[in-house]
Amino acid sequence: MKRIAVISVFAAVACVASVPQSSAATASAKDSLASIVDEVIWVVGDEAILKSDVEQLRLQAAQDGIRFKGNPDCAIPEQIAVQKLFLHQAAIDSIEVTEAEISAGIDRQIENWTQMIGSREKLEEYKKQTISQIRSSLHDDYRDRLMVQKMQEKLVEDIKVTPAEVRRFFKDLSPDSIPYVPTEVEVQIITQTPRIAEEEINRVKEELRGYTDRVTKGETSFQTLARLYSEDPVSARQGGELDYTGRGVLDPAFAAVAFNLTDPTKISKVVESEFGFHIIQLIDKRGDKIKVRHILRKPHVSDEAIEQSLARLDTLAADIVADRLPIALQGRVVADHFTFEDGVALASDDKDTRNNHGLMSLLTEDGRTSRFRMQDLPQEVARVVDTMQVGQVSRPFQMINEKGKTVCAIAKLKNRTEGHKATITEDFQVMKDVVMAKRREEILHNWVVSKIKSTYVRVNPQYRDCEFEYEGWIR
């Protein structure tokens, strides 16, 4: 159907151009041209690129502060054309993206815009759309971007770089081309979760049982209640739905209940996880994966409980700085000092950092690392350690952890490596990443050039003098 549309538009333009140049015919031709509200400027395979597509991307780039290499009039349609090549290959290779992935990406984009502009209300005013309309307008574009990204990842997944290649690359670099390594820090942390009153926990459980009763009695649907009340913002917008997921990805307590569900018409008992309290409804099982919907509710942490946790950590920090045993340990432990690591073992309730002497870590493509760039730290932690000296212990502070829970913490700056030009001895991983990125870029560039040669391409004459990044568009 798209090919027919392309031929029809080109045919319409050709017919207008062939009209005899009498005054009446000229007027008719102008009227016909005026009636064509859009124009096909490129064709890639079965896909048409419209002038409106280019203008829309140009406008979006201007809003986001994105600049294109070279002449935008040439670079923008070429970028769209390259995307269509990847999308075409993704369809051939059956690359898939889930609605959950799309929704999560759109949520991040909206959150970034909201932080930049100040509030969701201001964002709606700026975009002249409601948040729901913004989400809808972003959906197809973000889906395509994810498809392109996954296709590119598949094309470069087998790339490997040897240490010899890294050293050779670094040796051949000019001094001006050596990458700059930003400041990195290593941080130890002790966290405590404020105690939640039993009455508050019971209140949340009763809320969830009430939701179950309303669904069971047919008063409303699980999806409606999830959209209204669930405190999992991503799944709530999907009626509480989580896509097909393996047991290992889910919280163990949540998975234990979810994988034992057998009847889609029934709702689980209330289950507690690291994120809060849930009720769960089965949608489908497929092999070792399960598809469910859930409603998450989080007990409210009182200001009094937060103040008590901050006070306990303040005392602990003072004991660490003074190198004295806490009162609770005096007479029970024979020791002549009390370190931050001792404090982690005594008081921290974050199992991930507790098992690592409080040292925070970050998951990267090459495994876990304890070295953080400031922008990769949780905002609250980065704000605290930014002005600290190595070895210094912070005052207690409040933060939201990766589970979405309010916790209190103290931090110690274990190490700081100031920003510097990369060296092969100290920054081998940085240099390896540079070489890997260059290799990926070369492979993807060569793939696009090869794909252009084997794909039907038609470019309007106005673009024939463009200097494109990829050769082969003009034939």
Image (cartoon, rainbow, N blue to C red):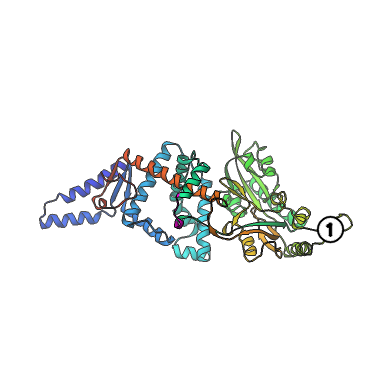
Please state the horizontal and vertical placement of residue 211, each as a whole percent of the image: 66, 50
Q: Residue at x 21, y 54 (%)?
A: 32
283 in relation to 187, above or below: above
Q: Residue beneath label 1, please?
A: 336
Residue furthest out toward the left = 22
Q: Residue at x 45, y 44 (%)?
A: 439
* Nearer to the camera, 174 or 370: 174
* Nearer to the camera, 74 or 418: 418
Residue furthest out toward the front = 171
Please state the horizontal and vertical placement of residue 461, each as a whole percent of the image: 23, 50
- Residue 160 lies in the magenta stretch: no
345 in relation to 265, above or below: below
* SS class, disc 1: loop
- Residue 173 lies in the magenta stretch: yes
* Nearer to the camera, 307 or 356: 356
**Quadrant of the frame with the N terminus:** top left
| Res 68 visible | yes
Predominant secondary structure in magenta?
Answer: helix
Apparent side of residue 198 relative to residue 84 in the rendered image (left or right): right
Please state the horizontal and vertical placement of residue 310, each as a whole percent of the image: 74, 63
**Quadrant of the frame with the C terminus:** top left
Stretch of the chain drawn in magenta: 172-176
Quadrant of res 326:
bottom right
468 in relation to 62, above or below: above
* Nearer to the camera, 381 or 112: 381
Please state the horizontal and vertical placement of residue 407, each as a whole percent of the image: 70, 58
Q: Amino acid at mark 1?
A: Asp
95 in relation to 342, above or below: above
